[in-house]
Amino acid sequence: MYIVQVTMMRKNQSMKRLLLPEELRFQNVTESRLTIQEVYDRILNFMASDPRAAYHFVIGTDSQGFNGYTKFVTGIIIRRMGKGAWACYRQVVVPRELTSLKEKLTMETALSQEVAYYFVEGAIQRMEELLLPFVYQGASLDLFIDIDAGTEPTINKTSLYVEEMIDRVKGMGTYAARVKPDSYAASAYANRHTKKPVRFKKRQELV
């Protein structure tokens, strides 16, 4: 669990987060405090066990507000289509309860992009190289950032901000953006891990 301080910049500027690189840690139901390198290794090992398969590499973030803080969870999923998946997630805590829907969605998208950038150089290339000898046997790799928002105004209040978030992802030039109902990394996997309140250490405060 990591506590970060978020400073909102002037309009049209990005958010600046005070988060040290060594705090980039991931977990799942069987492992904790995984480094980004260990996440790379788990993904490559999973893909190497069946390099002839079609894969989706997906990153998505969801959030949940609690009394005095907001919990963000960014999920990473490597999905072997029709044949299982490996996943992990990262937790970030902002020391205030975010009430603005746009601010929450912007922060969710920014956190997904941050994690996604760690894979752009090197990791994705290694994933593609692993599958390359088997492309004529069905191997493929698609890259997505899932946004926890929908396009239907009568169902999703976030529809007002969908186009802006999609443009942010498109601007990266590597990942395709997905929204509800297809954004399962955010709306299903990450969402599941946002529900539990954070257990803070004794005398630890949100500042």
Image (cartoon, helix red, strand yellow):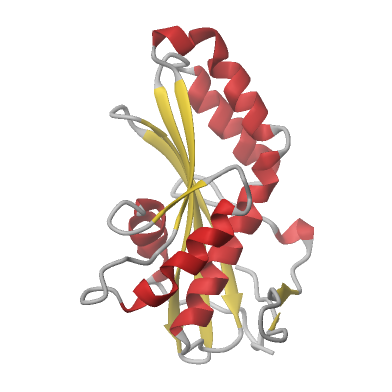
1 lies above or below 59: below
- Residue found 69% across the figure and 56% down from its top: 24
124 lies above or below 59: above
The spot of residue 204 in percent (x, y) is 66, 85
The spot of residue 193 in percent (x, y) is 41, 63
Tally of numbered discs: 0
Left/right placement of residue 98 relative to residue 157 reads right
156 lies above or below 37: below
- Residue found 69% across the figure and 46% down from its top: 118
- Residue found 67% across the figure and 85% down from its top: 11
- Residue found 39% across the figure and 76% down from its top: 160
The spot of residue 206 in percent (x, y) is 64, 87
25 lies above or below 121: below
Foreground of the two, 155 or 61: 155
The N terminus lies in which quarter of the figure?
Answer: bottom right
Left/right placement of residue 105 relative to residue 8 reads left
Foreground of the two, 202 or 65: 65
